[in-house]
Structure formats: structure tokens, C-alpha cells
């Protein structure tokens, strides 16, 4: 979904909130705030476990109470209600399945009154619009709001490989770092609460695109009784790494500038022969994953942009006027 920032907000977010300046590589040596964790699925449990391991005071609540048993054994305090958990935590982390359930959870049985003066950190997956609406609601209840996108699986929470995207109240982010930095690197994107979910979904879009390309490649290899494991280890991963490191930054700069001048093979050359599609069909491999991208490439050429680079296909996904 598009984030409809005003020009002023975009400038503010760009000028004062560069990602490079907001990545925490180590946990700050600050007093750890007390933390409430609402929702103890695999991810919520992993977050609470990391907080406990770092020495943070943690209160937990889950609709199915027995899911807190293991955390209580590790030192967590069990709350009987969301309101009880919120009252015990300066930072309130919400990690549940459905974004639509977050606001009712924070308003149930006195929870809303308990929120005053707290920092709500919602890491439930949602949209930019949902994040902004929830931020307004939380603000009305007297609390600060941060939306978070966890770029990790539960098993790597608390390791250097995990990072979490945050957006929302900057002062609240800084005040909460003693807790947030315990389970992942913290990346602050700006004051607009919608930035974290937008970037989260953009990263997932890139991930699923890569996975789709892998599945097509794997199907081709398997159609010829190839060793997919060896192919992936020895050829595909090094190839993708090299392409990502060398090509993506250049393509990103072209998307930002709107100048799609080709420095290598242009789009017309790339679509002049459908070798991938032809061989796939000959091998009995579906082109359902690759085909839509190929059609977009051909459309871009048909629209008169054959001399441009592959990056210009973005204009068929999100049209905008070129910058001066």
C-alpha cells in the first residue's frame, strides 16, 4: 500500500532519520524499562525470553494462560488481564496474530486507562493505514506509539542477525531502547507510524520475489534430474549475491532519479528471445511465476522504452512523473 506522506513529512523523515544513524549495533547501557508483552505465540515468547535473558523486568499476558508457564519459570510475572500487564510495564509490546484485534485488546477491561504514560510498541503485522489509525487511538489514550516490523524468525531473536524496523514517536523510541535493543538491532525510520509496516512489506516483497525466482530455477533443474542442492549452494547463491551487491544499488538509484539509461543490455535486447520461457515449456515447467514479469518487460518495450534498463519496469507498477 502507498504511504501518502506530505512533502513536509517526507523531508523531515529523510533529513533527521537516516537509517544509517538509527541502527543499534549493541544494547545501550541504560536503565532497562519494565516491559509488558501481550501475546505469547512463537514470536512473542521469543521477545519475552530475550528480554528476560537481558535482565529486563517482564510481565506477560496471553489469552491462553498456560502459554506463559515457561516464561514464568524463567522469571516473568504473569498478568491475569491485558490491563494488569499494561499497568506493570513502562513499555508495552503487542505481538498478536491479527492487527484488527490490537485496538480492542488495548481498550478491554480497563486497559485503556492503564495506558496513560506508557509506550506502546506494536509488532503485529499490518498496513501503513492501520498503523496510523492505531497511533491516533493510542495517543488519545495518553500513550506514545511505535509501530514495529520484525525482520527475523523467532529462532534468531536476540542474535546479531535480527533487526526490527520502528516508526512513530521518536522520543518514545529513544526512551525504550534499553528494552528494544535486547532482542534485535533497532532501525528507526521516522515519525510517520506507517513507515515501519511499509518498509516491512517492501522487504517481504523482495524476499518473495527472490523465493519465486528460486522455485522456477529449482523446477528447471529438477526437470532434468539436476541436483538442486548443489546448484543452489555452488551456483545460485553466489550468483544472486553478486547481482544483489552490484546491480541493485544501481537500479535503486535509477528508480529514485527516474533516469533508466541502460549501461549494459537494454530491455529490448533482454526480451528479444524468450529463452527462459521456451526452455521451461519444453521441460514441462510452468511459467506462472516468471511469465507475469516477462509480460511487463515486453509491455515496457512496446511503450517505447526498449533502450532503457530493466529498472524502468517499475513505472508499470507505480507510475509517476519524472523528477526535474
Image (spheres, rainbow, N blue to C red):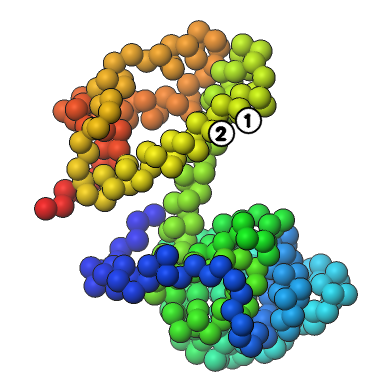
- Closest to the observer, 69 or 17: 17
User: What residue is rendered at 70% in x and 88% in y?
Assistant: 88
Number of residue marks? 2
Numbered label attached to residue 233: 1
Q: Which residue is painted at 68% across and 65% down in the image?
A: 158
Q: Position of residue 313 (x, y in %)?
A: 29, 36
Furthest toward the top, the residue is: 282
Q: Quadrant of residue 53?
A: bottom right
Say which residue label 2 marks. 237
Residue 198 placement (x, y as % from top left):
43, 58
Compared across the picture, whether 132 is left or right of 14 comes to right
Q: Quadrant of residue 220?
A: top right
Whether pointer 1 and pointer 2 mark residues with C-beta atoms closer than 8 Å, the reply is yes
Q: Residues within 10 Å of mark 2 (few under 14, many from 20)?
A: few
Seen in the picture, residue 155 relative to 85 is either above or below; the reply is: above
x and y, in percent, of residue 279 in the image: 47, 11
Amino acid at each position: 500500500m502507498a504511504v501518502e506522506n506530505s512533502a513536509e513529512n517526507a523531508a523531515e523523515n529523510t533529513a533527521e532519520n537516516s537509517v544509517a544513524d538509527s541502527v543499534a549495533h549493541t544494547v545501550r547501557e541504560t536503565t532497562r524499562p519494565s516491559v509488558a508483552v501481550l501475546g505469547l505465540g512463537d514470536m512473542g515468547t521469543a521477545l519475552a525470553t530475550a528480554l528476560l535473558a537481558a535482565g529486563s523486568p517482564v510481565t506477560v499476558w496471553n489469552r491462553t494462560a498456560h502459554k506463559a508457564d515457561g516464561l514464568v519459570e524463567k522469571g516473568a510475572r504473569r498478568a491475569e488481564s491485558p490491563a494488569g500487564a499494561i499497568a506493570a510495564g513502562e513499555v508495552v509490546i503487542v505481538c498478536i496474530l491479527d492487527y484488527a484485534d490490537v485496538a480492542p485488546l488495548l481498550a478491554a477491561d480497563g486497559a485503556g486507562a492503564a495506558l496513560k504514560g506508557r509506550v506502546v510498541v506494536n509488532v503485529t503485522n499490518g498496513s501503513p493505514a492501520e498503523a496510523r489509525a492505531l497511533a491516533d487511538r493510542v495517543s488519545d489514550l495518553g500513550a506514545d506509539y511505535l509501530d514495529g516490523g520484525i525482520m527475523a524468525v523467532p529462532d534468531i531473536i536476540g542474535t546479531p542477525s535480527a533487526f526490527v524496523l520502528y516508526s512513530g514517536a521518536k522520543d518514545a523510541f529513544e526512551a525504550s531502547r534499553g528494552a528494544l535493543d535486547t532482542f534485535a538491532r533497532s532501525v528507526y525510520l521516522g515519525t510517520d507510524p506507517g513507515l515501519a509496516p511499509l518498509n516491512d512489506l517492501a522487504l517481504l516483497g523482495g524476499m518473495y520475489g527472490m523465493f519465486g525466482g528460486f522455485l522456477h530455477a529449482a523446477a528447471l533443474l529438477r526437470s532434468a534430474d539436476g541436483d538442486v542442492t548443489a546448484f543452489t549452494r555452488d551456483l545460485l547463491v553466489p550468483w544472486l549475491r553478486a547481482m544483489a551487491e552490484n546491480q541493485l544499488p544501481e537500479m535503486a538509484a535509477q528508480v529514485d532519479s527516474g533516469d533508466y539509461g541502460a549501461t549494459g543490455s537494454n530491455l529490448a535486447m533482454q526480451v528479444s528471445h524468450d529463452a527462459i520461457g521456451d526452455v521451461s515449456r519444453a521441460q514441462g515447467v510452468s511459467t506462472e511465476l516468471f511469465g507475469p514479469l516477462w509480460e511487463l518487460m515486453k509491455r515496457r518495450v512496446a511503450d517505447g522504452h526498449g533502450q532503457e534498463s530493466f529498472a524502468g519496469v517499475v513505472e508499470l507498477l507505480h507510475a509517476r512523473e519524472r523528477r526535474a
